[in-house]
Image: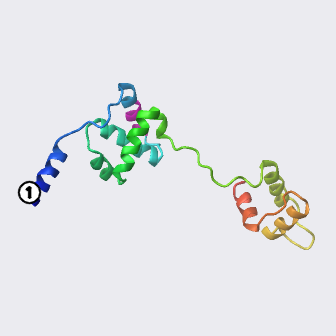
Amino acid sequence: MYRSRVVLTQWYHSHMKKQHLTLTNEDRKTLTELLAKGTVRAGTSKRAMALLSLHAGDALTAVAERLNVHSTTVGVWRDQYHTDGLRFLNDAPRSGRPVTLDGPQRAKITALACSTPPEGHSRWSLRMIMDKAIEATYCETISHQHVANILKKTS
């Protein structure tokens, strides 16, 4: 008896389409065009596909399974759409670690690496640049790996 009720419940939920979201024609068109571009970030694309699927009447669990996210996440996206409209599609800025060296400091380190190496050396090593940058008070502290990352970002 219990098994047949579970099967009937599953059939009911899979066949009864409840529209969890109604998009405006303009929002639906914007989402469709956004996905057609193909150059959208993965998170933005998932959120857009979820909204379109919910508008089409798919269940939260079906959308979540298709997009490989939890159904709670799809519900949050739906609620964010109701609150913020399509603005929620883009990721919010993240706090992250603050920048330790500003542009002029990075430029000085890059210029130092491009300058003539000290006498007795054919080229600059990362550790020599690190020592010279601290000695010249370009910065208070820096690691040789940070110097490498700065130089990697220059051509």
Span of residues in magenta: 30-37
Tell me the residue at 82%/60% (across/down).
113
Q: Residue furthest top?
A: 25
Image check: 155 left or right of 88? right
Mark 1 crowd level (few <14, some 14–19, many ≥20, 10 Å Cα): few
Q: Between 16 and 150, which is closer to the camera in this rendering?
A: 16
Residue 139 drawn at (x, y percent): 84, 58
Residue 134 drawn at (x, y percent): 87, 63
Residue 23 drawn at (x, y percent): 35, 30
Tell me the residue at 48%/38% (across/down).
88
Please, what is the three-letter code of the amino acid marked with disc 1?
A: Ser
Residue 35 lies within the magenta run: yes
Q: Is disc 1 placed on a helix, strand or loop?
A: helix
Looking at the image, residue 132 lies above or below residue 67? below
Residue 150 drawn at (x, y percent): 73, 58
Image check: 32 left or right of 127? left
**Quadrant location of the N terminus?**
bottom left
Residue 80 lies within the magenta run: no
Q: Which residue is mark 1?
A: 4
**Quadrant location of the C terminus?**
bottom right
Tell me the residue at 11%/51% (across/down).
8
Q: Quadrant of residue 44?
A: top left
Q: Between 77 and 1, which is closer to the camera in this rendering?
A: 1
| Magenta stretch prevailing secondary structure | helix
Q: Residue furthest right?
A: 119
